Amino acid sequence: MRNFNSFFNLLLTIAASTLLFASISAAATLTVKSKDGIGNYLADDKGMALYLFKKDAPNKSVCGAANSCLEKWPVFFAESVDPNAGIALTDVGTITRDDGLKQTTFKGQPLYYFFKDKDGEDVYGQGVNNVWYVVAP
């Protein structure tokens, strides 16, 4: 049983790492989408919604791997902003997190994906625990 638990923990670690690195390995473009009931919100170039965490401080993420937060809320990092999206370049920044990962910010808020969002129409993270919300431009 101990070997099974060790193996299972190893698989979970690999899966979480894969999800995390998949979210940050390819730089994306920041853009704006709109959805009835939500309005305009930030998304990546594939249309995936981006979220903010109300517990974060300006330019500082408290969502980390130690508390399993990053498994559900992977980091978003973009190297560019679509100039046609109506996003002011001065509102977009990059931080280096305590774990060494780069993360894109919008008006100082670190940006995240939500693991339950599978396509560009999903916004399942909206309002989760009253601390996770899509980012209004």
Image: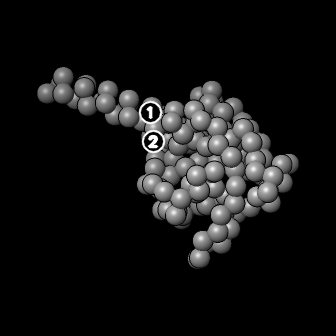
Residue plotted at (51% across, 32% down): 21
In this view, 57 is above or below 34 = above
Taking depth in this image into account, of 70 and 32 the one nearest to the observer is 32
Q: Which residue lies furthest to the left in this view?
A: 1
Residue plotted at (61% across, 43% down): 76
Left or right, 83 with respect to 48, comes to: right
Residue plotted at (53% across, 43% down): 74
Asked which secondary structure carries label 2, the reply is helix
Which picture quadrant has residue 8? top left
Residue carrying label 1:
18
Q: Are marks 2 and 1 in contact (CB under 8 Å)?
A: no
Taking depth in this image into account, of 82 and 53 the one nearest to the observer is 82
The amino acid sitting under disc 1 is Thr
Residue 65, how many percent across, how many down? 49, 35
Taking depth in this image into account, of 21 and 69 the one nearest to the observer is 21
Q: Residue furthest bottom?
A: 37
Residue 39, how many percent across, how many down? 65, 72
* Residue 127 seen in this snapshot: yes
In this view, 54 is above or below 16 = below
Which picture quadrant has residue 18? top left
In this view, 88 is above or below 28 = below
Residue carrying label 2:
71
Please state, as top left, top right, bottom left or bottom right, where the N terminus lies in the image.
top left
Labels 2 and 1: the sequence-earlier one:
1
Please state, as top left, top right, bottom left or bottom right, where the C terminus lies in the image.
bottom right
